[in-house]
Image (spheres, coloured by chain):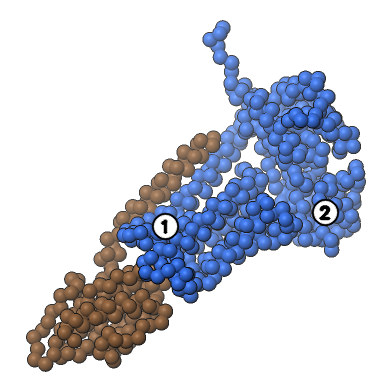
Amino acid sequence: MSLRTAPSPVARVVTDPSRRIRSRRRLRNADLMVVLCWSSVAMAVALYLAYGGPAQVTDLASGLSALGIVTGLVGTDLILVMLVLAARLPMIDRIVGQDTAMAFHRRLGKPALYLILAHGLLLTVGYAMAAGSNVVAETVALFQGPDMALAYLGLGLLVTVVVTSVVAVRRRFPYEVWHAIHLLSYAAVLVALPHQLSAGGVLADGTVQRVYWIALYVLAFGSIALFRFIVPIVRSARHDIRVAMLEPIAPGVVSLHLTGHQLDRLQTQGGQYAIWRFWTGATWWHAHPISFSAVPTDRSARITVRSLGRGSDALGRVRPGTRVSIEGPYGIFTDAHRSTSRISVVAAGIGITPVRSLLEHAALRPGEATVLLRATDDSQSYLWNEIGALPGLRGNPIFSMVGARPHGLATWMSAEALARGVTITSVFPELLDSDLYVCGPQSWADLVIRDARAAGLPHSQIHVERFDW
Amino acid sequence: MRRRAIVLSILSSSAVLAAGWQLGVATQPQPVSQSLSQPTDAAAPATGTGGTTADGSTATPTPAAGTGTTAPSTAGASGTFTGTAAQTRFGAVQVQITVADGTITDVAALQLTDHDQKSVQISNRAAPVLRQEVLSAQSANVQNVSGATYTSDGYLTSLQSALDQAGL
């Protein structure tokens, strides 16, 4: 008896073969993306190696210059990777989700800047040493080179973009100002291109390296142009979305009913969000990421929003008939990303919105779902009545947990539930055989995930939608 | 899963780097051997615009530097004299002069600054100008071409060594 080891949590998962395969494929593709990303960095270095760069290193000066060239290549490659990650490629969104892609984008920001700064510094020092001049004279000489003024402009823009994105600095600006500055990064990368092609020997005319490099630029900027600008503009024009009605559902919470043409062709999945722009004088400059609180039909869609900032406050005052443009739908908080046959759902406060459309869309049989709705007090039970009325939840338990969290304790549960000895596994007895969907404030959701992980639930079965909106 | 991504990334990156290194090593002898023929190409427009019959002399580079094949003559020195290669940040510069009876009749660039695209452009622009100036001044005492300081310095340094050999 004692020799028999307990089965591992993963082995106990009730697998739904097709879901399991899809989930595996997604993980494989996610890994492939990581591999591609690092291979592109290696490729940047390989361009220099293939050019025969190392053979030119004979002394300290040429060594510094060589290092300067490599840092420039790698730094630029990273920036192009960042652009691709921020381009909202449908493929990337489907595989890892835009949130994860942007988290990676943010992590690359500083290393890329440091590499580009090192590029400028190392080359200046290396050239100055080789020429026997000083750094200042060399900078002046470099500045006068063709395309170099543009390159320095690009460097200045890049520093501005990254400095304004450092968390402490970013908080000082309204989001829109920060975002406008951030868009300068496109210009920074573009104006740096001429000097790469004309001053650099690695990317000289007629080389394969040059073709590859230009292809990278085309890929990055093509993705941005297509998926951040052309597709949203075409979609918004085609569907002609307008505000039909505002439905206040609680103090500070409002459902916006939208109408449009063939909205089902957006192929929105329950649990997804879109980035919305309301074309009124007070709101057009602010794009809001808001979850669908119902799966769109042919003619109508519904989103629900709580006022969390000045911008979303103004949304409660838009007039019916207001034109709305859409970017999206995005997100992997969907039933399609489920890897097991059961679903466990925890939603807190306004986090109910994606959960509402997720559960509406999911094909659920009795006994397959368990839902826990969480609120600090009764005023936060947004859309709870609708959850109970969903046909897919017939025969599936829906729990509610109302009450404030205890002071000084890191828990996602109410003080009352904690005192009763409730745990995540007592709410979801079959947690490990299910996919857990969590939506609520970030810090709260982190605590739910902590408990789920502690209970043995693997990462691949946890789905989170954070909302700061 | 993460481990798989890391392992595959390392493998793939290593393969890419190795391929790059191989290509670099494979093309390595070429730039060295080309360093004589390539600048000849670069110098071709120079001899072309000059209008002299120097095309033949540039097409037959004398590989070893410093050995002027002096033809015995009565008045002044005659023959071709190859200057030493002057190293600059953007590559070596080496010129060869053709002298007839103590007069420089042609200057051919065997090697010009060619480290990168920009250097090649600058070289191609500066070489004809320098050649013309040298031919009219009959010495290395000519102005630098603006925007081509390194090329000019190297050019005139190498030229001076060729002139010294010719005893001019």
The label on residue A67 is 1
Could you say which quadrant of the image residue A406 lies in? Answer: top right
Instruction: Name the residue carrying label 2.
Output: A310
Which residue type carries mark 2? Answer: Arg
Judge by depth and name the residue closer to the eye, A20 or A159.
Answer: A159
Q: Position of residue A309 (x, y in %)?
A: 81, 51
Q: Going by the image, does A386 lie left or right of B108? A: right
Q: Does mark 2 fall on the same chain as mark 1?
A: yes
- Mark drawn on residue A318: none
Q: Which chain is brown in the rendering? A: B
Give me the C-alpha separation between circle 1 and circle 2. Answer: 48 Å
Q: Residue furthest top?
A: A1
Most foreground residue, A273 or A62 = A62
Q: Going 42% across and 57% down the picture, which residue do you hit?
A: A67
In the rendered view, tell whether residue A110 sits above or below residue A433.
below
Q: Colour of chain A?
A: blue
Front residue of B74 and A62: A62
